[in-house]
Image (spheres, helix red, strand yellow):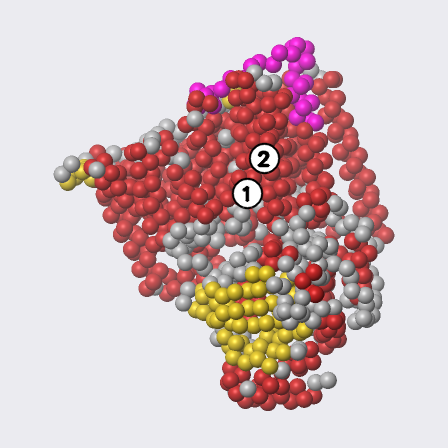
Amino acid sequence: MSPVRTAVTSHATAVRRAVIAVAAVALAVFPLVSNDLYYQAMLILTFLLAIGATGWNIMGGYAGYISLGNSVFIGLGAYTTGILAARQNISPFLGCLAGGLVCAIAAGLLSLVTRRTRGMYFTIVTFAALQLLAIVATIWSGLTGGSQGLALPLPAWSLSYQDWPFYYSLFGLLVLSVAVSAGVRRSKLGLGLFAIKDDEGKATGLGLAVSVYKLIAFMLGGTFLGVAGGIYAYYVTFLNVSAVFDIVTSMLIVLAALLGGRGTLWGPVLGAFIIEPLANLTSTSLGGADAGAIRLLLFGGLLGGVVLFLPRGVLPTWHAWRRKNHDHPERTVVPPAADVSPGAPAAEGAGGTSRGSRSQDGAVLTVRGLTKAFGGVRAVDGVDLEVAPASVTGLMGPNGSGKTTLFNLVDGTVRASGGRITLAGRRVERSGSTARSHGGLARTYQLPRLFPSLTVLENVVLAERRLSLSRLFLPRVTAAERPRALAVLTGLGLSGYADASPAMLSYGQRKLIELAQVLWLDPALVLLDEPAAGISPALSQRVAGIIRRLRADGTGVLLVEHDVAFLASLCDRVYVMADGRIIACGTVPEVSADPAVVDAYLGDQVALAAASRVESAP
Amino acid sequence: MTELIQALIFGVLTGSVYALMATGLTLTFGVMKIVNLAQGAFLILAAYLCYTLWAHLGIDPLVGSLFVTVPLGALGVLVYRLIIERVQRVDHGLTIVVTFAIALVAEAIITLVWGPNPVAATPAYFNQAFHLGSVSVPAAQLYACLLAVAITVLLQAGLRRTWLGHAITAAAENPDGARLVGVEPKKIGTWIFAIATATTAFGGAALSFLYQFTPDSQDIWIGLTLSVVIVGGLGSVTGAFAAGVLLGLAESVTSTYVSVRWAEAVPTIMILLVLLIRPQGLFTLAARQDAAA
């Protein structure tokens, strides 16, 4: 980082801290110095929206899962509190905690529904859940008062305290929710959430239990909003279904978070402080029959406008603008890469049950009769294959012969239509990617998949061998992990890039980082999809060195590669695939001479060229 | 027994109309992976236009829908080219948010134009019925069902027989491959949105004489059409038809044997159940999802 930029950044940080501190103090003393109930009411609603947007942001901003139904939590929190207060005489300030609990459970159930889907299905589920609960609350009128509404007891405190209890409890809750959101950002939980936003499939392959991460993120946001909804219920003292389960509230939450800056810490709060006063202004200045429609037009239009013209939100856009104007074009100097030494010490893995499986004699991977049909096409058709520990097994075949599908079947990205997969002695054909990763499997992709939101070092330490809830609350990179991860990077000659974004790296370097992720997992079985394709001969030699080291450490390596010389120099054995079947197996010279292989590769020039390269290979 | 047969007939008739209402969403969701939450508002808009043609010019909604296809198709093209296509380029995940915003704006405009009170078109046949023994078949439901079947068959034939249909199917199955052979996604997207919102006119026409509707009933209809698409499985016109009928039956049986009010909850319950148990939908083969990676 250049000195100029550092100065600008620290200056900006100081300014930001000062602004936040002044704003917090001003909000804390405001009710004491002003007895204007109008502004007090407006701030109470602003806090509610800010809590909602901050909670939404943990799932919607960090993990990238957009909920359009978060007012469901306001409704559940409000009704839980209201029902307890009206029927059981429980103080709303206690009842709202029960509201938070109910919301945590509801968020957990909704996470269960979305467990098997990704992307927009989450949005649809939240949308549907909001509709469903509104209908159920109307039908279940014995409990909720239905369309008649539910009245809460009036606050009993002296009028001279005005709305202070509401004001300070919501203000405190907002401070708490921002603190929790900040804590999530700095923890391994946050690291995983940002990884999920970047590439969920890859994160799963690295052993992240993504559904647990998403579950916690969604529950956190829901709980805060549920407690806030309970306080809100006491504040308005009268609940009716259509007002409490209002989709417009959901929309305002999304609008506030998007406007301020999705994925930032303070963006949702800033957004709420812009949106709620505006909403307040329109509700006091607009009158008449069309007021509701005009408000809808205004806020719907605003939401559309933000998505179209300010999709990153105010804060990120502002930061980007500042950087452009203050940062000098001189590139940050990256120290020269250290020389690779293939004998560099192997890093210890990410903990967990590493290598336990290696002591046994049998194959680390056994595949029997594995089949995958897509409609009528059998992409993989009755494949038998074995990978021994401490060996390198090659897999070759023309494009479209089923190699990558086989990889996807073995790592669990795709479920097999039939057959068995045994990984380190355990049947896994029915387990998910995460379980297989925990069972000792790691893979790289033909085109490297890294997480651009994380630094190179974070990309490496992200991979995990088992799920441990307490681990999620550790810092992103612990003091113990950092030197170990640096050692892995140094071994690959990439230590100078530890704190850079992977987006700055070359294609070949990104491939090496993927290998670093694999090394970090300390796997029993590694699947490498064309690790040497498209990279320079020097890097390719470095990759070969890493593969040899993996073998020396006892790992079984399954390698897809088109470069026959590369395969010949490394592999103990190769399998050749064509049309989804294994057509040959043996050493590289053996299979190169096999007429079936020559035929599969269409023509004898290929075979001749391959043979000559094998001869000239070291 | 009669009660059950009656419920089944009613379910099939209603369900086919649900499928008709969902065809627009089936196309955009299935082919372009765009969940157009404005579909419910477009449907209501079409219903208001058909209603207006009927109320002021005496044009039967079934005929009026033909005129309504033109402004709705144009609206679809505008919305796609000016808004959705731009958002899609920046962040595909935000398309659902922007269509939600469009839905709210459309609801607001419809309220400003037509007012918030419920209306319905009442052509001569709206309360007539054909009787088969003790079972009655409401005429309006029957006509709407026939319209739904006709549109579904036409769409299916269009997808199977025309170059555009092949291009749409190709773009759905493999966008990159389609681009390689000269199928430009933006052009296909424009056509899909044009067809999707134009056919919404027919769904709106059926809605206009089968139900009372208000501008804010759009969120009921978007919930219902989403349910059809998710239960049916993405992008399958015939799957959507089957799902519509299934939903219609479930609603009809629920309102006959449980209560009318719980029938209202059937579509959203179906969404949650199907996503929990069989996320790829009830009427589709598992599609290959790793090829794009």
Residue type highlighted by circle 2: Ala
Tag 1: amino acid: Ser
Residue A420 appears at what percent x and percent y? 52, 65
- Residue A567 in the magenta stretch? The answer is no
Task: Note whether A168 is above or below A475 in the view shown.
Answer: above
Residue stretch rendered in magenta on the structure: A144-172
Q: How many numbered marks appear?
A: 2
Question: Quarter-wise, where is residue B248 in the image?
Answer: top left
Question: Would residue A15 be found to the left or right of residue A72 on screen?
Answer: right
Looking at the image, the residue that sits furthest to the left is: B133
In the image, is B212 to the left or to the right of A342?
left
Determine if the magenta segment contains residue A170.
yes
Look at the image and tell me in which quarter the N terminus of chain B lies. top left
Residue A549 appears in view: yes
- Which residue is located at x 31 percent, y 53 percent? B152
Measuring from the top left, give residue A368's x and y in whole percent: 52, 69
Residue found at x 70% / y 32%:
A176
Q: Residues within 10 Å of mark 2 (few under 14, many from 20)?
A: many
Q: In the displayed structure, does residue A597 sit left or right of residue B151?
A: right
Residues marked 1 and 2, same chain = yes
Circle 1 packing at 10 Å, graded few (<14), some (14-19), many (20+), is many
Residue B291 picture location, percent across and down = 52, 64
Look at 63% across and 46% down and name the residue there: A213
Residue behind mark 2 = A104
**As rendered, which of A544 and A40 lies closer to the eye?**
A544
Residue, disc 1: A111
